[in-house]
Image: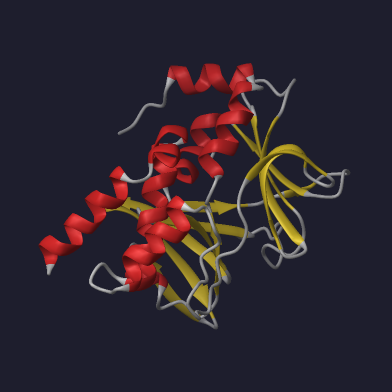
Amino acid sequence: MRSTAIGTLCFSLLSLPVFAEEDPMELQRCIWQCQANYGTESAKYPECVERLCEGGGAEEQPKASSKQEGRWTYGDHPVLGRSAYVEVGDAALGIACVGDQGSFVVSHRMTSGIVNDPAQPDGGVMTMFKKPFSVGGAFVYQKNPAGFFERIAAYCDSEIAEMQRSTSIVFLSGKFVSLNFESDGYKMTVEQAGKSMVVASEVDLKKLSDSRTISLSGSSAAIKQLTKECPALRQQITEGCDEF
């Protein structure tokens, strides 16, 4: 059965020239999404790859507590301004380029409705990423007079790299406790309903009582367009980030 699944995957890769040429990472994300929804042994898996990845249609998500919504685009949003953004119901999440802020070139933006209180002092915005999994961080956003909440950062302190390589971003509810780096990676401790929980893997995310998952479909292409219009961001990406 495993060889059949691998053969199906290889066939799907060969049959998606347009998707692969535009953004190979988008193709991989699409395939991962089908794998996550159905598993490679299911007859629905190749159907999902053909319909969603080749046809570009919207995949119906299985019932879950955290629903994935929307597709990222680049342009002028009525609240967020010119940005790479996604609309989720009546709310929106995005990234913009900022000028005259020294080394701060990235503006993470969101409207009300993404998380309960982005300006909460003890980590109003806590993030994780899925497929591949990585720990984001805990951030406090400021209210911008334009009507959105904002966090500005240098490229290396932003979450752009994670957003470009993962399939979805997860916003955790509750209270931020700590973020620690150990030999096996970052671990975040959060408190929900008076109980502290350590999150260090996708399995741990399932233990949380409250979280929200937003798809990153289309984010790579949207961020690429943003980068073209933001020389300061391009420079910081070229310079790279020191890793320990």
Is residue 183 shown to the viewer in this render?
no
Between residue 112 and residue 218, name the one nearer to us: 218
Q: Is residue 44 visible?
A: yes
Q: Quadrant of the C terminus?
A: top left
* Location of the N terminus (image quadrant): bottom left
**Residue 106 in the image, given as x and y percentages of width and height:** 63, 33
Colour basis: secondary structure
Dividing the picture into quadrants, the one containing residue 14 is top left
Residue 21 placement, left or right of 7: right
43 horizontally vs 160: left or right: left
x and y percentages locating residue 21 in the rendered image: 42, 33
Query: Residue 237 placed where, x, y %?
Result: 48, 23
Task: Compare residues 158 and 238 and report the one nearer the observer.
Answer: 238
Residue 101 position (above or below residue 76)? above
Which is nearer the eye, 98 or 121?
98
Give 122 or 60, whichever is nearer the viewer. 60
